[in-house]
Image (tube, helix red, strand yellow):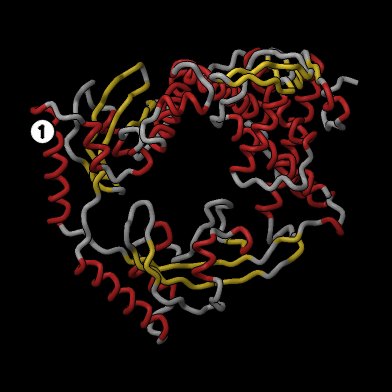
Amino acid sequence: MLLNRINFKFLIKSALLVGFISFNFSHAQEIINDDVVEVEQTKDTIVNKTRIKADGVAAVVGDFIILESDLDREIAQLKAQGADLKDVTRCELFGSLLESKLYAHQAIQDSIVVNELYIKSRTEQQIQGILAQTKGDMQGLLDFYKKDSEQALRDEMYEINKNGYLAQEMRTKVIGDIEVTPEEVRTFFNDIPVDERPIFGTELKLAQIVIIPEVTEESKQAVIDKLKGFKKDVEENGSSFTTKVLFYTEDSASKSTGGKYTLNRNQPRMVKEFRDVAFSLQEGEISEPFETDFGYHIILLEKIRGQEYDVRHILIRPELTQEAIQEAKDEIDKVRAKIVDGTLTFAEAAREFSDEKETKYEGGQMTNPVTQDFNFELTRMEPELYAQIQDLKDGEISEVIQDEDRVNRIKFKILTVTDRIDDHEADFAKDYLKIKELALQDKQVDAIAKWQKETIAETYVKVNGVYKDCDFKSNWLKK
């Protein structure tokens, strides 16, 4: 089926591109003959002879070699990420590996600029993340990845990250500007045989009302005073900012790296308030406490490198009092009672009482973050949300649910199902956005196929060993 072809190609490519940027670095990069050799292995006083298969070159694409172990490593990485590979052949995965190297090779030929500071920052974050899990055991890390020095590990991590970056940038260059017109969407849909049109699963429209406990001014001031104390201790007593991050920050995403982030003036990252403060500092300066939706921060600006700013920060969220929590719970109980007894509709109650700005003015209607419409397909719904609505009948109001998110450690909500669309064959009018996305993917697949055909013809490609017998979609064997 056409849709199966589209989904298979894109899912495998996406998964492999993610895998290439991973950091499993135990494989060698030198060219070794693909044969079986007898090696004498010595460890302490034990000597024995073992028959082993050398790590042979499976393929060469331009300036890149692919070792037999590279594919084994990528398969292991995909399985570790939870990918279901039972219906995917080794040849298909190897073809995707060839594609990645072709992207990276052509990116170099096209002089695509590598953001070296980004790659270095990513590499450093990876190292610090691993060390956080191994309690700072660098030697153990080197032994595990079979590296002689920390620099050798960093160099290989850098190269793998760089090549993954090049491959992604090249792929974006090939398909980034592709769009589909309404007429192309209609033609795509009409060209699908009636008996092959996709079946879309049951979809729900959901609405929610959220009540968030109010933080007291006393709690806010307590956090501000604590952060001011940290700032004073570092500036006047020489205390370590990084140590305070490890002990006190509530930003779990950056705690393992000592609160470090690299910001770029030309590439928005972090919320506006955070960026504005960071870009106003001088090197070595610590900001005054400031507020974002996530809580209160102080920032230390460590280094300015052109447009790049290396910062560390401490995040602390004000404590919630039991009184504030109980007041929020009591309020949402009252709101639910008014909806159940008919005093207010769910939409009216949402507009009047909900604290969630994103849904409040839509009568509580929730937007699917993936599709950007109001429909949630049951089989693709986040497990936590599914558990909260799975037993709801249309129009029924859920019991009060205590929940949390990245911003709020406690919030209360009620949910309802405002509409239900059962399993159905794709309908052009009802499912236009989904069909448009499939049409776009199909057009992108065609663009990639054309680009690959032209680029393979112009690039040195040699496939070795058992992979010569693969039936590749692209002409890697140049027959």
Q: Is residue 455 left or right of residue 193?
A: left
Residue situated in front as seen by the camera: 419 or 66:
66
Q: Where does the C terminus fall, quadrant-wise? A: top right
Q: Which of 304 and 55 lies nearest the eye of the viewer?
A: 55
The answer to whether residue 471 is above or below residue 476 is below
The residue lying at 81 percent from left, 56 percent from top is 197
Relative to 131, residue 116 above or below: above
Give whichever of 184, 365 is nearer the camera. Answer: 365
Query: As displayed, is residue 36 above or below residue 244?
Result: above
Residue at horizontal 82 percent and vertical 28 percent from the top: 474
Q: What residue type is labelled 1?
A: Lys
Is 12 rendered above or below residue 114? below
Provide residue 157's location: percent of width, then percent of height.
51, 23
Looking at the image, the residue that sits furthest to the right is 479
Q: Position of residue 261 (x, y in %)?
A: 35, 31
Please indicate whether residue 268 sits to the left or right of residue 40 in the image: left
Tell me, yes or no, if residue 455 can be seen here. no
Residue 409 x, y percent position in the rendering: 32, 57
Task: Name the quadrant containing residue 472.
Answer: top right
Task: Identify the residue position indicated by label 1 in the image.
Answer: 232
Residue at 21% from the left image edge and 56% from the top image edge? 319
